[in-house]
Amino acid sequence: MAYPTEKQVPENQDRIQCLYCERTDEEVPLIQFVFKGEHHFICNRHLPLLLHNPKELACKLPDMEQVGAARGH
């Protein structure tokens, strides 16, 4: 699986930005992840949502409500 190189924007996005708050990589550090074959980015502030409460991202990512929270912390 190929990951975007610097400034290469995934097909499902107009620009590289946080899935939740839409801040860009020019404003905050972003972490890339893949869900259902699509590349997405999330900022450090909203990463805990992805890890501990992914259902809150269901409005942005369909089927995310089925993903369980991380365990074992």
Image: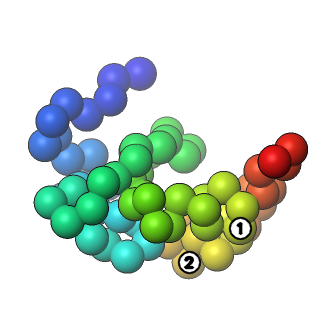
Please report contact status of discs 1 and 2: CB closer than 8 Å, yes or no: no
Amino acid on which disc 2 is placed = Cys
Relative to 19, 36 lies left or right? right
- At 44% from the left and 59% from the top, the residue drawn is 44
Which is more toward the observer, 10 or 17?
17
Picture quadrant of residue 24? bottom left
Mark 2 neighbour density, 10 Å: few (under 14) some (14–19) many (20 or more):
few
Residue positioned most to the right: 72
Judge whether residue 33 can be spotted in this image.
yes
- At 67% from the left and 64% from the top, the residue drawn is 54
Which secondary structure lies at badge 2? loop
- At 78% from the left and 57% from the top, the residue drawn is 69
Question: Which of marks 2 and 1 precedes in the sequence?
Answer: 1
Q: Where is residue 41 in the image (x, y as percent from the top left)?
A: 38, 53
Amino acid on which disc 1 is placed = Asn
Judge whether residue 13 can be spotted in this image.
no
Residue annotated with mark 2: 59
Which secondary structure lies at badge 1? loop
Residue annotated with mark 1: 53
Q: Distance of mark 1 from mark 2, alpha carbons?
A: 13 Å
For marks 1 and 2, give the one nearer the viewer. Answer: 1
Which is more toward the observer, 28 or 42?
28
Which is more toward the observer, 47 or 65?
47
| The disc label shown at residue 40, or none | none
